[in-house]
Amino acid sequence: MAEKANKRDLILAAAREIFGEKGYHNTTSEEIAKRAGVGKGTIYQYFESKQDIFLQMHIQYLQQYSESVSALIQTDSTFEENMRRIIRFHLDNLQDLMQFGVQFMSKMKPGEEHCAEDYAMMEEVRHQLGIEQYQILDIAKQRGEIRDVDAELAISCMSGMFVGIAHMVGMRKLTDEEKIQMQESLLAMVLHGLAK
């Protein structure tokens, strides 16, 4: 069973590299198999198609990212302390997140209809990244650290903040000083809004 999981992970890791290098449309299943060190037929023991590999690769990435964020949440920490760790984690992983976005968007051709799987993938992104934020908000509400806000609206705002930062920074590597400044600014906006 461990060997099966290992081969599946090798295929997904190879796919992530090649999709990142060449984009979705210029990547073949044969290239993925060769990079993973498996036969082409082996791929189809684990995945239905190249599109399935692509979607499963992104779901795996999101699950790992989500687990990393979840590990940062400490129930004995304040809302501010938890948010500071999560914001820093996002800033430390901006380039990886941007690569994820580039890979996902490379699959879309201009004028092409988005298929149901792509929409499901986007919903999975939103769901995975929102789970931890619900947990933080719930703990903070129970302690009286934050107002009783609409959790879904608050999470949409925080998610938008992270997406906006990713667009603003792009693939540029931030210095530690820039990360600290951005972290404190973002934290101040989350905690106090924009008003003086």
Image (cartoon, grey):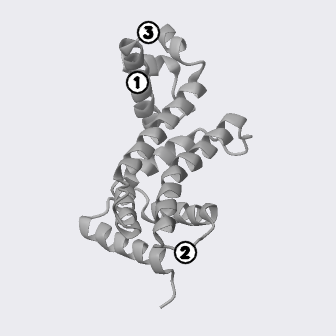
Question: What separation in Å lies between label 2 and label 3 (alpha carbons)?
Answer: 56 Å
Q: Is residue 26 visible?
A: no
Question: What separation in Å lies between label 2 and label 1 (alpha carbons)?
Answer: 43 Å
Residue found at x 37% / y 46%: 68
Q: Nearer the viewer, residue 104 or 161?
A: 161
Comes first in the chain, label 2 or label 3: 3
Comes first in the chain, label 2 or label 1: 1
Q: Label 3 belongs to which residue? A: 39
Comes first in the chain, label 1 or label 3: 1
Q: Is residue 156 visible?
A: yes
The local secondary structure at tag 2 comes to loop
Residue type at tag 1: Asp
Q: Label 2 belongs to which residue? A: 147
* Left or right of 21 in this view: 160: right
Q: Nearer the viewer, residue 13 or 22?
A: 13
The local secondary structure at tag 3 comes to loop
**Which image quarter: residue 10?**
top left
Q: Label 1 belongs to which residue? A: 9
Q: Nearer the viewer, residue 28 or 74?
A: 74
